[in-house]
Image (spheres, rainbow, N blue to C red):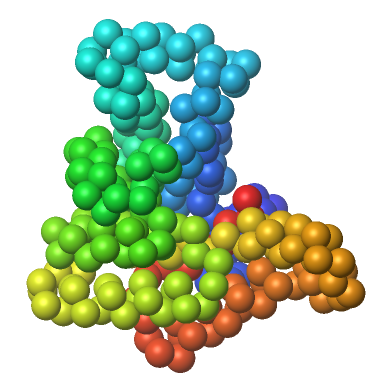
Amino acid sequence: MKPYFHRVMEQTPTKFWINNPTRAEADLALEHGALGCTNNPSYPQKMIDHPEEGAYASRLLDESIRETENETEAQIVFQQKLVRPIAEKFMPLFRSSSCEHGYVSIQGDPIREHDPNDIIHEALRNRKVGENIACKVPTTAAGLKAMEVLFAENVAVNATEIMGVQQAIDLFELYEKVTRQANVRPKLFMSHIAGIYDAYLKKVVERDQIEISRDVLWQAGLAVARKVYLMMQERGYPGTFIGGGA
């Protein structure tokens, strides 16, 4: 019998990505049919703490500190050094699929994600890691301003931290407007994070002592995901829907 993810891709429109992988996990994911990879800002710390990757990651961190003048620059370079070999593993898929699959996303430092200029600056630097890099940007007010520039520059984007329907609408409408004006069509991924949304609602319910069935409450994030996905189909919005739990 074929592996589970191969069967899912054959029988449904669903595709498989991997999140924050080690080098070995990236190889295993590709073997099992992964078509892309996304990394979070916590990725460098996860690699430092990893029992198999810790020594390797620490060596890259030391290199990054020596090569840069401050901790901000060191953090950017360190993440790039960690992501580059992962991107290289997905590059054959990127090329064989005519740039349709094999993307690896990098997200900048969340501390500086309130300033569109900082997001743009770091995204354009991260883009140089490889042809198959998608710049991961939060779908906030600042993030949307940054994406307006990145779309016009034909930069592949993974728009993340989407938890509401209106966020998705704002993203898609912006993409359509900018790409039409710039006559480009960069790859767009839309990451809906149901898990964090559900966790937030759970805290609100507990804090305000709201009476609601747990069976209903835990469907909230999934309900948004279904609404956004249906809207993409009905309105013909571009992009790939990525479902995120954490």
Residue occupying the far left of the picture: 182
Asked if residue 103 shows in the view, the reply is: no
Asked if residue 245 shows in the view, the reply is: yes
Q: For this rendering, which residue is in front, 202 or 102?
A: 202
**Residue 102: x percent and y percent?**
36, 49
**Residue 125: x percent and y percent?**
21, 38
* In the depicted structure, whether residue 173 falls above or below residue 201: below
* In the depicted structure, whether residue 186 falls above or below residue 66: below
Residue occupying the far front of the picture: 208
Q: Is 83 placed left or right of 148 in the picture?
A: right
Q: Is 93 placed left or right of 20 in the picture?
A: left
* Residue at image location 53% in from the left, 19% down from the top: 48
* In the depicted structure, whether residue 13 falls above or below residue 24: below
**Residue 87: x percent and y percent?**
34, 37
Q: Is 111 placed left or right of 225 in the picture?
A: left
Residue occupying the far bottom of the picture: 234
* In the depicted structure, whether residue 53 falls above or below residue 119: above
| Number of marks in picture | 0
* Residue at image location 36% in from the left, 72% down from the top: 171
* Residue at image location 45% in from the left, 82% down from the top: 232
Q: For this rendering, which residue is in front, 110 or 186?
A: 110
**Residue 92: x percent and y percent?**
31, 42
* Residue at image location 23% in from the left, 16% down from the top: 68
Q: Is 102 placed left or right of 28 in the picture?
A: left
